[in-house]
């Protein structure tokens, strides 16, 4: 039986076996280092793109929810109350007769915003629209700047900070 140690010039010795193991260990560490560097570059290059896509994604969700509330109003003759919230888009309220048999969304759940926070539904008489749906941004708190700024269903062309 040929010992791998003989192939590189060592006899069947402990020294040859140790050097073979060290060589394999160094090769493994080098490969792991290269993989780590490639992954680090991938994260550095693509992570900023992923975080910036949350605002347009949430804006799209706000538009969908806003239109669903308008369709609910068209069908039932009223807007959801703040107590009912957006759930009336997926669950039929007991006092509503002309509710769409399939609901108003393509899902049976109210989707969260891109930061996995719940949307806020408020009745806003005297404002731009009779209601507003709000995403509290990345921090989930009122106000904020940048990705933490609140997004409103009535104005999707710019980010606004709620005071």
Image (tube, rainbow, N blue to C red):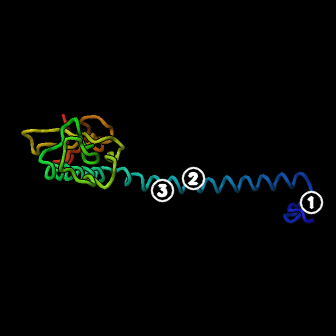
Mark 2 vs mark 1: in front: 2
Secondary structure under the numbered disc 1 in the rendered image: loop
From mark 3 to mark 1, how far is it between C-alphas? 45 Å
Residue 143 locus on image (x, y percent): 24, 36
Looking at the rendered image, the quarter that the N terminus falls into is bottom right
Mark 3 vs mark 1: in front: 3
Q: Name the residue under label 3.
A: 42
Instruction: Return the disc, 2 or 1, that comes first in the chain's sequence.
Output: 1
Instruction: Return the disc, 3 or 1, that comes first in the chain's sequence.
Output: 1
* Residue 17 makes an appearance in the image: yes
Q: Mark 2 points at which residue?
A: 36
Residue 74 locus on image (x, y percent): 13, 52
Judge from the rendering whether residue 81 lies leftward or rightward of residue 22; answer left or right: left
From mark 2 to mark 1, how far is it between C-alphas? 36 Å
Q: Quadrant of residue 80?
A: top left
Judge from the rendering whether residue 71 lies leftward or rightward of residue 25; answer left or right: left
Circle 2 residues within 10 Å: few <14, some 14–19, many ≥20: few
Residue 8 locus on image (x, y percent): 84, 64
From mark 2 to mark 3, how far is it between C-alphas? 10 Å
Circle 1 residues within 10 Å: few <14, some 14–19, many ≥20: some
Q: Name the residue under label 1.
A: 11
**Between 16 and 63, the one nearer to me in the picture:** 63
Secondary structure under the numbered disc 2 in the rendered image: helix
* Residue 60 makes an appearance in the image: no
């Amino acid at each position: 039986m040929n010992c791998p140690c003989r192939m590189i010039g060592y006899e069947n010795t402990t020294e040859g076996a140790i050097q073979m193991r060290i060589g394999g260990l160094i090769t493994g560490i080098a490969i792991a280092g290269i993989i780590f560097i490639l992954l680090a570059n991938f994260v550095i290059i693509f992570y900023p793109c992923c975080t910036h896509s949350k605002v347009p994604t949430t804006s799209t969700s706000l538009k969908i929810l806003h239109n669903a509330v308008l369709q609910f109003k068209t069908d039932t003759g009223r807007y959801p109350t703040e107590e009912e919230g957006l759930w009336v888009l997926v669950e039929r309220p007991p006092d509503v007769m002309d509710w769409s048999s399939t609901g108003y969304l393509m899902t049976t759940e109210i989707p969260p915003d891109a930061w996995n926070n719940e949307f806020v539904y408020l009745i806003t008489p005297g404002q731009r629209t009779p209601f507003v749906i709000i995403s509290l941004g990345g921090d989930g708190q009122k106000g904020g700047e940048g990705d933490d700024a609140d997004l409103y269903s009535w104005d999707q062309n710019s980010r606004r900070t709620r005071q």
